[in-house]
Amino acid sequence: TTAPQALRQKFQAKAEAVSAVVRSVASPREALAYTVDLCDRKEACQLLPAGCTEPLSDKARDLCDLKAQKVIAAPGLPAAEREELERLCADRGLRLTDRPLREHLAGIDIGFTYADWGIADTGSLVIDSTSEDLRLATMVSEIHVALLPLSRLRATAYDLEGELGGLMRRTGNYTAFITGASRTADIERVLALGVHGPLELHILVWEDA
């Protein structure tokens, strides 16, 4: 069995090779503070920059008002962590969205999620994304921040055979393998980031082991 720190070093090297940012945190609370600080420092993503001064329906006005603040989506957090994130967002003038993300498919600055597992061999995250809100948070945000407990890091995908088999036997399962930020070279073979998903992936390795 490979030592946790050796796995972590390999995971970081592989993840950074595909443009992910990897940092260590001592607790979920530190991860939340990192996320809020990152959101505070980034430029707000733009949504409907024109037209918001015109007469609008209530729904359209609400959409424009959202971009008066930067927005963080963090579906599925434990209650105590969500309360902490709400407090941190309020202190920085950020908005923690509580609406279903299907109703908010643009203008999300950061999506924060837990990762279920990490794979050191490829620098990949594995996330049970059966929840639509969680799935969207990893796909439509400008930046995805994922918290990965070190104890959930495995050497290869083969080491997750049992866990993945259990997930895939569940009806309606959606398991995501995420390696680096979104990228494509479909357009004239020029590499572009963020076309099909987040521009940046930040992986916070929680040193729980």
Image (tube, grey):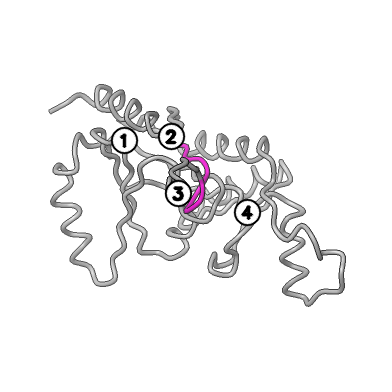
Marks 2 and 3, how far apart at CA: 15 Å
Q: Earlier in the sequence, mark 4 or mark 3?
A: 4
* Badge number at residue 20: 2
In depth, the one of 50 and 167 nearer the eye is 50
Q: Earlier in the sequence, mark 4 or mark 2?
A: 2
Instruction: From the top left corner, tell me how far across and down residue 107 is, in percent.
Output: 64, 56
The residue at the point 37 percent across, 29 percent down is: 17
The residue at the point 33 percent across, 43 percent down is: 125
The residue at the point 47 percent across, 37 percent down is: 202
The quarter of the rendered structure image containing the C terminus is: top left
Marks 4 and 1, how far apart at CA: 29 Å
Is the residue 8 above or below the residue 142 in the image? above
What amino acid is labelled 2 in the image?
Ala
Instruction: From the top left corner, tell me how far across and down residue 131 is, in percent.
Output: 40, 64
> Mark 3 or 1, which is nearer the eye?
1
Circle 2 SS class: loop
Task: Write down the residue under mark 4.
Answer: 96
| Labels 3 and 1 touching (C-beta < 8 A) | no
Task: Write down the residue under mark 3.
Answer: 113
Circle 1 SS class: loop
Q: Earlier in the sequence, mark 2 or mark 1?
A: 2
Give, as a single range, the part of the protein colored magenta. 194-204
Task: Write down the residue under mark 1.
Answer: 123
The quarter of the rendered structure image containing the N terminus is: top left
Marks 4 and 2, how far apart at CA: 24 Å
Q: How many marks?
A: 4
